[in-house]
Structure formats: C-alpha cells, structure tokens
Image (cartoon, helix red, strand yellow):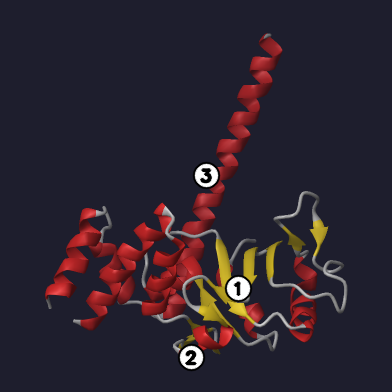
Amino acid sequence: MKDVAHAIEDAERAGFDLALIDESLRLTHEERARQHDQALALVLEFDRIRSERNAKLESSSAATL
Amino acid sequence: MQSLSHLLQRLSDSGVDFVVIGGFAGVLHGSALVTRDLDICAVLSLENVERLRETLKDLHPSHRMTPQPLSFLHVPKPGENVRNLYLKTDWGIIDIISTVTGLGDFERVKSQAESFQIAGRTCRLISIEDLIQAKEALGRDKDLLAARELKAIAAKRSK
C-alpha cells in the first residue's frame, strides 16, 4: 500500500492530473484509443496553424527587408 | 485523415503478429499523454515485411528517417533484411521495431503481453510493468516522466 500511495503522490508531484487518469481508467481500450485520436487531431491542427502563421511572418519580414 | 486507432486496426488485419508498445501502449493503459506515433514490436521477417507492404500500400507509406523520402513499397528490396522500420503513412506515423530496449525481442515482449479489443479485433498490448521497464531503460526525460504516470496507473489498477 505504501508503494501504491508513493506512486500516486509521485505522479501528482510530476504534474499529472490524476482525475484525467481516473477518467481514462473508466473507459475501454477502444474508447481510450478514439479519445486519443481526437486529441492528436487537435495537436496536429495547432501545428498546422502555427506553421502557416510562421510562414506568413517570414514572408512579410522578407518583404520588409 | 490521421488516426492511430485506424492504423492499428489495419495492422491487425495484416496477419502480422505484433505487440503495441511505446506511447500509444501507454494511452491504451490509461495515460493522458498524447503521442504522435504508433509503435509496435514484431518479427521483421521477409514474409512479415511483405505483409506490411501489402497492408499499407494504399496509405502511401514512406521511410521517415532517410535523408530522401523513400517509398516503403520499393525499399527495402524483396529479400533484403531490416531490423526496424520507421514509416509515415496517410493515417499517421508507425514505427516497427524488432527489439525493445530494456526488455528484449518480440517473443520476450509477447510473453507478458495482454490482449485487448478494438473494432472487433483482438490485439496484443505490452504489459504495463514491461512498458515502465522499457521507458526507464530508455532513460530520456520524456520517458522517465511517462514512467512516473504509468506507475500511478499501475498503482490505481492494483487498488
């Protein structure tokens, strides 16, 4: 039990949201995989927006020079 | 479309015996961390490489670690041995490795693996204890952090 409590406290100290883990553990493997797909899609969309914005900034600063 | 779960289903239909490892295995165990690739451990026999080629052929698979983009449909040549494959496809990145750091080969990983269902298919998943061991053996900051979360998941599951 001491090890169990230590592992949980350690993860909390590392900044993990234990409520998110509890929520995930209530799901099936398939539901976890689907939920992850949605989160990854969002991350990739942010990547796309960031790289578009960077390209615009680069082209406008090149035009200014 | 990017979907690691669809990629996993596709691989499951390939006839290649594999175990899901890495960050996506963490997700399947309950991790809240997001990973960008699907890692699997498999025997990369000549036969399995051809099965993978056939399975992934319409997803434009290419090698992602080579200086020039090379199609997996042409490289490696038939009969040429490979130890690992690092591929990108239309559905996402897939890394196929034959040995897991800190654990050993496919048979070793499979011996402790558990089964799970996805879209009516049965797949193998590295045990959480093995995944923790592998992450700690890799020793990078991100792996050590992931191991701390996995230990909490293992602890919560044992309660």
| Residue that label 1 marks | B6
Q: Please tell me if label 1 and label 2 are on a single chain.
A: yes
Q: What's under tag 3, amino acid-wise?
A: Phe
Mark earlier in primary sequence (1, 2): 1
Task: For marks 3 and 2, give the one nearer the viewer.
Answer: 2
| Residue that label 3 marks | A46
* Image quadrant where residue B3 sits: bottom right
Q: Is residue B78 left or right of residue B31?
A: right
Task: For marks 1 and 2, give the one nearer the viewer.
Answer: 2
Is B142 drawn above or below residue B5 in the view shown? Answer: above
- Camera-nearest residue between B34 and B78: B78
Q: What's under tag 1, amino acid-wise?
A: His
Residue at figure coordinates x 21%, y 68% from the top left: A7
Q: Is residue B144 left or right of residue B78?
A: left
Is A60 drawn above or below residue B19 in the view shown? Answer: above
Q: Residues within 10 Å of mark 3 (few under 14, many from 20)?
A: few
Furthest-left residue in this view: A2
Under circle 1, the secondary element is helix
Q: Chain of mark 3?
A: A
Under circle 3, the secondary element is helix
Locate residue B13, reporting x and y percent: 67, 86
Q: Quadrant of the N terminus of chain B?
A: bottom right
Q: How far apart in space, not on screen, are marks 3 and 2 (Cα)?
A: 39 Å
Residue at figure coordinates x 66%, y 78% from the top left: B10
Q: How many marks?
A: 3
Do the residues bearing badges 3 and 2 touch, measured as CB atoms within 8 Å? no
| Residue that label 2 marks | B111
